Image: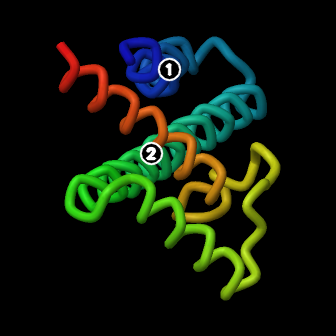
Amino acid sequence: MLKGYALSILPVVLITILLRIGDRLPEAILTICVVISFVVLVGGVLYRLVKFNLKCELEADEFAAELVGADAMIRALKKISKHDEIPVKTPKWFNVIYSHPSIEERIKNLRISQAKNEKAQNM
């Protein structure tokens, strides 16, 4: 987790350093470095937002599974997939483009959550 925050702060630090030594660098190099830093910063923020959104979606699935059961949620996700023609198995980049995790990831997360709950109940 700390690694992600460090990477998000890196462009700000780089821009600050470049502005301090900017009078010693050619203007084109300084401009390129500032633009690259800005792109990395914006990309990092967008990546964090997507990851947060996916995490919220998985937590919502877990909450619904507590109400109706994980097996019922898995059946419902498969029906949604079939009805809306959403593939169950998707490539890894799927979660970067879409606001919802893939059906496969949601089912996997529900099964993991179900196993943890069963283990906690047996203790």
Q: Which residue lies furthest to the bottom in this view?
A: 83
Quadrant in which the C terminus is drawn: top left
Q: Which of the pair 97/40 is nearer the observer?
A: 97
Q: Which of the pair 71/77 is nearer the observer?
A: 71
Q: Which of the pair 31/63 is nearer the observer?
A: 63
Quadrant in which the N terminus is drawn: top left
Few, some or many C-alpha atoms within 10 Å of disc 1 (few <14, some 14-19, many ≥20)?
Answer: few
Residue at the location (62% across, 64% down)? Answer: 98
In which quadrant of the rendered view does residue 101 lie? bottom right
- Amino acid under disc 2: Leu
Q: What element carries label 1?
A: helix
Q: Residue 110 carries which label?
A: 2
Separation (CA) of disc 2 from disc 1: 31 Å
Q: In this view, does 94 lie above or below 116?
A: below
Callout count: 2
Q: Is residue 72 above or below residue 26?
A: below
Q: What element carries label 2?
A: helix
Q: Residue 7 carries which label?
A: 1
Residue 42 is situated, as x and y percent measured from the top left of the image, at: 52, 46
Q: Which of marks 2 and 1 is nearer the N terminus?
A: 1
Q: Seen in the image, is 111 located left or right of residue 88?
A: left
- Amino acid under disc 1: Leu
Q: Is residue 62 above or below residue 18?
A: below
Residue 75 is situated, as x and y percent measured from the top left of the image, at: 53, 67
Few, some or many C-alpha atoms within 10 Å of disc 2 (few <14, some 14-19, many ≥20)?
Answer: many
Residue at the location (30% across, 21% down)? Answer: 119
Q: Which residue lies furthest to the front in this view?
A: 122
Q: Residue 113 carries which label?
A: none
Residue 83 is situated, as x and y percent measured from the top left of the image, at: 67, 87
Residue 109 is situated, as x and y percent measured from the top left of the image, at: 48, 41
Residue at the location (39% across, 22% down)? Answer: 5
